[in-house]
Image: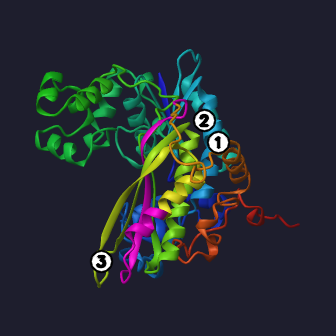
Amino acid sequence: MYALVDGNNFYVSCERVFRPSLIGRPVVVLSNNDGCAIARSNEAKDLGIKMAAPWFKIRHLEQEAGLVALSANFTLYGDMSDRMMSLAAGLGPTQEIYSIDESFIGLDGVRGDMVKRARTIRERVLQWTGIPCCIGIAHTKTLAKLANHIAKTAERRPGSYSSELSQVCNLAGLPAQDLDEVLGATEVGSVWGVGPRIGKQLREAGILTVLDLAHMDLATIRRRWNVTLERTVREIQGQPCIDIDDAPAPKKQIACTRSFGKPMHELRPLIEAVSEFAARAAEKLRSQHSLATELLVFMHTSPYRPGRQLSRSVVVPLRRPTDDTLAIAQAAADGMRYMYVPGYRFIKAGVILVDLQPASVLQRELDLEPPEQSEVKRDRSRLMGAMDAINDRYGKGTVHAASTGRTEPQREWGMKQERRTPQYTTLLEDVPIARA
């Protein structure tokens, strides 16, 4: 048995915890540089706002419909996610944090009324964090994901959708006839793993509902589509094919890329930017206990702005595998110096650590350089650990490489976040104060 705990409209819900005046109003959270909508309240969805809708196309709704648009506050969302996930873990013995707002819980060995237990956890999450969530329960992860979708939409759908399925939906507890009725009323594109392209092909083949998909012949699916879709159908039929992954495999690449708040044409801010990106990537590298042997640095102009266009990238090899922020930032800065061409207005840059290996693998080499030219080999692992501990406690960037330049508000290459709310839970000066 599996459960999926999912925060409702998570980014918007995080904002509403600290600004109750937003409850009942259409709200969207915008992406980096306030580009497009990445989260929408139900009221915003009712206005017809689609996911990833460009801000300039929906901006008129501020005046016409009272739409509230906020810049993304990922520091706040990450902290609220940690709080929600720690409470969701009480539902069962194993947990896989699938995304910032979703968590699979393994229910093997859990006895008693699953729905009652799930509702208790849901109420606890709401009371202790202010985040509303829905919980789907089923015999497979794919069905649990589908049950969560039903839990979110049941009360807004007429007919066979019972109010008992709202907020917490246990497909494993439904009689076979009721289960078929629910699956027959759910569109095939709602299934986890059925993307827009395959969904279109299925509908063209007459497969319109989840029940239609569950009744398909497995050999036909494998022959016409692929093994992945066959596995999805097996899961819908109740055959577990995907286990809880409570220890995700280390990433094979780690990237940190950003668009700038405004075009950059000088070398100095570009070096500052890639040094910061390299530091963030190195921190992620250490968290999964890996080393990088080379990194890719890139930058490009905007294809949507007038003027000359340029896109460049370079792979910078590291002398030995490392997770040292200073070494990786230095390599990124060297790559930027090599690529830089004056006279262009660059809008985006990034650093991608590639060819990763476990930190347990040691590389030794002979020192063939004369003593006066030999690199001083220092083990800075304790320094990196101290940096991570300080930044984790006091906020990212509290301790940083000098090449990253000034602090966040003063960086001319920083993202445009004119509508960002305070970091209520992670920055001391932003903590709300209750006055008598």
Q: Secondary structure at mark 1?
A: helix
Q: Secondary structure at mark 2?
A: helix
Determine which residue is flagged by label 1.
Answer: 125
In the rendered image of this protein, does residue 72 appear above or below residue 219?
Answer: below
Determine which residue is flagged by label 2.
Answer: 88
Q: Which residues are magenta?
A: 334-361
Using the image as rendered, state which of residue 208 and residue 286 is in the foreground: 286
Determine which residue is flagged by label 3.
Answer: 304
Say whether marks 1 and 2 touch (CB < 8 Å): yes
Q: Secondary structure at mark 3?
A: loop
The mark lying in front, picked from 1 and 2, is 2
- Amino acid type, residue under disc 1 in the picture: Val
On the question of residue 41 being in view, the answer is no
Mark 2 Cα-neighbour bin, 10 Å: few <14, some 14–19, many ≥20: many
Dot 1 or dot 2: first in sequence order is 2
On the question of residue 288 being in view, the answer is yes
- 191 left or right, relative to 369: left
